[in-house]
Image: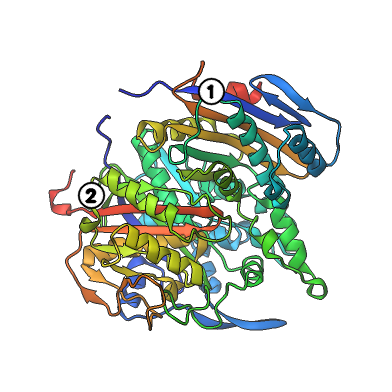
């Protein structure tokens, strides 16, 4: 096999209830602050969720674009990518790709009470892609990755594959989903929503908390002085459970196979993994499945967290958001506690991170699993800037 | 040295007809899309009760992959066959049904069996269950069939050793209209795997 180009994540940005920069987000995690709050709904029970302040976002957006031309999700995605690019020397060129990770995009426009209800085209994901592509005057059309809850992690894997195949030199990934009646009603119909802020891996966990966030990253084959927290994407795999469309495999088969394949590509062993950033949605079945898959992969003793009790489950953003927090953890040599955890509630005890603490870190594994039997594993390796190119 | 890859076989469903490798194998004049899909199911002589629970997007992906797999001269293996699908409308056909079920507070009936299909990759799950494929899978959404990304990604999965065969293509359902172009990519076949051949077969 030919020697593959190295692919790096060189810059990142997070826009969430915990801040409008990756640093602000990470600092909030260092204080174990959660973005989840109780929200009231007209005619329905109040519920817990982590929701972005849209008014603040619109004020910021007004400085760079016309608020009325873009949907709420488009505005937030454009804001995030603007900040991502603004902090870097990188210039968009003809070999720059755009990948958008989302499960439902502008699905809120299907509801009569939304500003864009009269423009049905806006519900189509390629139109969301065109709006982001057009704003940044990118030559290449957007690739939307819409693969349930693994989308954000899978988007990084897809970018790596397409960059190594030289279709693109660099890729901008932006990920996001907003909390909508559409999504909340759906998860409620599954009785999957927790009555309290979610408690991943805990004995008394009772489901997910829905959240919203935008995460974006720049992926390049090189890096420079404006790159931040550089990591190399050394392994990726995405294996289906082939078991059930809405429930995870009881044996964790697809997740286990994904981890094995990603390790093989990275030429690493389970003992080389310093930290696992897991999916940890806090549903009974997901967390249990993960514990079994991690044991099969000999990763049950490795420090692991779920960030869902800080952000809620941010769907298409979650995988990328958690990848960014993970790579910041590597560079700060800091493990973030798995908020909401009390008593071990999975049959294979995991090494859940109970308090923030320092540890020398160089490689981490990011995993996600979702509807459709999907699973994705991604292995990222810290890069020392001092030895850098350029 | 890169492996030489071929479009092993291909199948298209459009305008009420099913086309396998350039030949029409089934067509009718049914105007209701769901009935047409049921007719194709019966034509293929399938016995798979799960089919009737699927939404239309999953049904077209399922039916087309049945035709491709059953007419392939290669074995579709569990961890070696990747599934790569794309379309334009994502799962909007089902999204609209779910939205309808929550729009009227006096007639509020969201259902998990509808909601689960509000993700376009569920059809990949259905195909994976049917053929036991514990393999690479992804769902892309494009304004139209993107032969360049499809070719590059399919080729990359095989050349990087992540798969030996790729079940791939375009599966769009929108407003009673179906447009499917799916194919198997492998080291065996006669049509060379290239973006040019893919778009030619899709448009032909």
- Residue sitting farthest toward the top: B190
The image quadrant of residue A288 is bottom left
What residue do we see at 41% from left, 80% from top?
A340
Alpha-carbon neighbours of circle 1 within 10 Å: few (<14), some, or many (≥20)?
few
- Residue sitting farthest toward the left: A387
What residue do we see at 26% from left, 67% from top?
A301
Q: Which residue is the site of mark 2?
A: A268
Q: Report x, y in % for residue B22.
A: 66, 19
Q: Report x, y in % for residue A46.
A: 62, 83
* Residue A339 in sight: yes
Alpha-carbon neighbours of circle 2 within 10 Å: few (<14), some, or many (≥20)?
some
Distance, label 2 to label 1, CA atoms, is: 36 Å
Q: Which disc is residue B143 wearing?
A: none
SS state under label 1? loop
Viewer-closest of A28 and A198: A198
**B117 sits to left or right of B36:** left
What residue do we see at 79% from left, 27% from top?
B27
* Residue A323 in sight: no
Task: Identify the image quadrant of the C terminus of chain B.
Answer: top right
Viewer-closest of A326 and A174: A326
SS state under label 2? loop
Q: Which residue is the site of mark 1?
A: B73
């Amino acid at each position: 096999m030919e020697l593959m180009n190295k692919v790096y994540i060189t810059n990142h940005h997070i826009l969430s209830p915990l801040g409008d920069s990756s640093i602000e987000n990470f600092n909030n995690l260092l204080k174990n602050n959660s973005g989840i709050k109780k929200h009231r709904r007209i005619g329905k029970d109040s519920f817990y969720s982590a929701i972005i302040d849209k008014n603040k976002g619109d004020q910021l957006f007004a400085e760079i674009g016309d608020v009325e031309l873009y949907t709420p999700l488009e505005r937030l995605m454009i804001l995030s990518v603007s900040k991502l690019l603004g902090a870097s020397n990188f210039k968009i060129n003809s070999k720059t790709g755009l990948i958008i990770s989302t499960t439902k995009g502008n699905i809120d426009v299907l509801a009569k009470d939304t500003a864009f209800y009269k423009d049905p085209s806006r519900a189509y994901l390629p139109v969301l892609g065109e709006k982001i592509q057009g704003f940044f005057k990118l030559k290449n059309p957007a690739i939307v990755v819409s693969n349930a809850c693994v989308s954000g992690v899978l988007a990084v894997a897809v970018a790596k594959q397409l960059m190594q195949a030289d279709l693109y030199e660099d890729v901008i990934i932006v990920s996001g989903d907003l909390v909508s009646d559409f999504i909340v009603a759906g998860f409620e119909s599954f009785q999957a929503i927790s009555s309290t802020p979610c408690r991943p891996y805990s004995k008394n966990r009772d489901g997910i908390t829905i959240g919203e966030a935008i995460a974006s990253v720049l992926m390049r084959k090189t890096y420079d002085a404006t790159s931040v927290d550089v990591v190399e994407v050394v392994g990726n795999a995405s294996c289906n459970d082939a078991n059930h469309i809405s429930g995870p495999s009881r044996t964790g088969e697809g997740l286990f196979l994904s981890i094995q394949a990603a390790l093989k590509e990275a030429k690493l062993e389970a003992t080389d993994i310093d930290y696992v950033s897991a999916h940890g949605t806090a549903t009974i079945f997901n967390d249990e499945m993960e514990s079994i898959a991690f044991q099969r992969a000999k990763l049950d003793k490795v420090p692991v967290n779920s960030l869902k009790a800080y952000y809620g489950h941010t769907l298409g953003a979650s995988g990328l958001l958690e990848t960014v927090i993970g790579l910041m953890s590597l560079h700060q040599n800091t493990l973030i506690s798995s908020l909401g955890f009390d008593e071990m509630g999975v049959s294979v005890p995991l090494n859940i991170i109970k308090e923030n603490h320092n540890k020398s870190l160089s490689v981490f594994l990011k995993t996600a699993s979702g509807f459709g039997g999907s699973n994705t594993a991604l292995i990222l390796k810290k890069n020392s800037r001092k030895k850098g190119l350029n | 040295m890169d492996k030489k890859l071929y479009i092993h076989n291909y199948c298209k469903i459009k305008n009420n007809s099913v086309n396998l490798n350039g030949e029409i194998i089934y067509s009718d004049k049914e105007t209701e899309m769901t009935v047409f899909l049921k007719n194709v199911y019966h034509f293929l002589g399938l016995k798979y009760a799960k089919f009737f629970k699927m939404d239309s997007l999953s049904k077209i992906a399922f039916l087309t992959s049945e035709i491709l797999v059953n007419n392939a001269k290669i074995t579709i293996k569990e961890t070696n066959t990747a599934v790569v699908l794309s379309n334009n409308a994502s799962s909007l056909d089902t999204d609209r049904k779910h939205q309808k079920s929550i729009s009227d507070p006096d007639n509020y009936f969201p259902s998990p069996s509808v909601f689960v299909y509000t993700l376009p990759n569920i059809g990949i799950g259905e195909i994976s269950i049917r053929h036991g494929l514990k393999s690479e899978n992804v769902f892309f959404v494009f304004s139209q069939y993107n032969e360049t990304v499809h070719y590059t990604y399919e080729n990359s999965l095989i050349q990087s050793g992540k798969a030996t065969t790729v079940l791939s293509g375009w599966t769009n359902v929108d407003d009673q209209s179906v447009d499917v172009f799916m194919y198997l990519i492998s080291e065996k076949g006669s049509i060379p795997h290239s973006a040019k051949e893919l778009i030619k077969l899709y448009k032909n």
